[in-house]
């Protein structure tokens, strides 16, 4: 597999090598040796999640308080999603920037985002099934959201607001500026220090 860093520090794309024949195909969607070689640390696995979304569903932008945060390794098993990574870490050189990665059943890519980054996606097909490997279990008191259509961030979602489906929680989420003013955003230096303390330099 090929693991490539994105322009946002702490985020990577993972492109597996697919082996196909008349029966179908086989691939490794996670390899610890390759992961450690690329990122410099192992992936702690505390929880595995799966979501199924209809076309037009937008989920995110989600993150968790750091420490401990929640690192995520994400792939799409069926259908297709436009995955979105947003740097919401105050003090980061790329604060407020975002990147998108197409996760589908053609290239079968995955993305890895470390603690403190914001994450979301838009489902491009009905039945799009996304699997997540998470470094920490779900903890409602530490989970946070940023409004996905915040114009300050300006994510180029594939759907207009009126064309998509949002959860009530995501629709009511604060903007990036509001979350910053309330002291709800992760701090870049704290995220770096926390990762270093776990051997995740």
Image: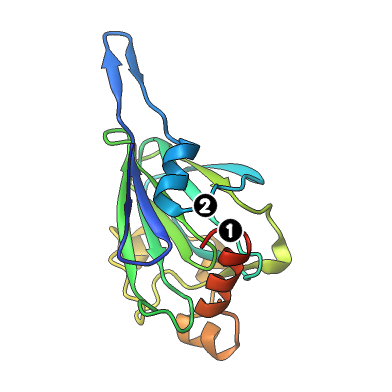
Horizontal side, residue 56 vs residue 144: left or right: left
Q: Which mark is residue 112?
A: none
**Mark 1, secondary structure of its residue:** loop
**Mark 2, secondary structure of its residue:** loop
Q: Residues within 10 Å of mark 2 (few under 14, many from 20)?
A: some
* Front one among 15 and 201: 201
Task: Kindly tell me whether residue 95 is visible in this rendering.
Answer: yes
Q: Residues within 10 Å of mark 1 (few under 14, many from 20)?
A: few
Horizontal side, residue 124 vs residue 190: left or right: left
Residue under label 1:
199
Image spot of residue 111 (x, y percent): 40, 49
Horizontal side, residue 147 vs residue 55: left or right: right
Query: Going from the N terminus, do you reach mark 1 or mark 2 first?
Result: 2
- Disc 1 and disc 2 in contact, CB within 8 angstroms: yes
Image spot of residue 182 (x, y percent): 60, 88
Identify the image quadrant of residue 187. bottom right
Label 1 and label 2: CA atoms lie apart by 6 Å
Q: Please name the residue shown 35% across and 76% down the image.
A: 94
Residue 16 drawn above or below residue 178: above
* Front one among 76 and 21: 21
Q: Please name the residue shown 43% across and 69% down the image.
A: 148
Image spot of residue 197 (x, y percent): 63, 65
Residue 3 drawn above or below residue 108: below
In this view, which residue lies farthest toward the bottom?
181
Q: Which mark is residue 41?
A: 2
Image spot of residue 75 (x, y percent): 43, 42
Identify the image quadrant of residue 165. bottom left
Q: Please name the residue shown 38% across and 39% down the image.
A: 126
Q: Which image quadrant: the N terminus?
A: top left
Residue 76 drawn above or below residue 169: above
Q: Please name the residue shown 68% across and 52% down the image.
A: 137
Task: Kindly tell me whether residue 57 is visible in this rendering.
Answer: no
């Amino acid at each position: 597999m090929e693991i490539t860093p994105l322009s946002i520090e702490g985020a990577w794309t993972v492109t597996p090598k697919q082996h196909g024949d008349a029966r179908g195909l086989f691939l490794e969607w996670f390899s610890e040796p390759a992961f450690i070689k690329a990122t410099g640390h192992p992936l702690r696995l505390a929880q595995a999640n799966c979501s199924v979304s209809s076309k037009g569903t937008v989920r995110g932008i989600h993150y968790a308080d750091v420490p401990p945060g929640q690192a995520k390794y994400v792939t799409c098993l069926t259908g297709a999603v436009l995955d979105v990574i947003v740097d919401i870490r105050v003090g980061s050189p790329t604060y407020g920037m975002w990147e998108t990665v197409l996760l589908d059943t053609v290239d079968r890519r995955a993305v890895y985002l470390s603690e403190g980054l914001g994450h979301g996606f838009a489902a491009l097909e009905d039945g799009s099934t996304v699997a997540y490997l998470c470094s920490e279990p779900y903890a409602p008191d530490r989970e946070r959201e940023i409004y996905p259509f915040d114009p300050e961030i300006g994510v180029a979602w594939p759907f207009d607001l009126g064309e998509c489906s949002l959860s009530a929680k995501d629709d009511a989420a604060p903007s990036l500026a509001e979350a910053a003013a309330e002291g709800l955003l992760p701090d870049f230096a704290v995220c770096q220090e926390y990762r270093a303390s776990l051997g995740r330099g």
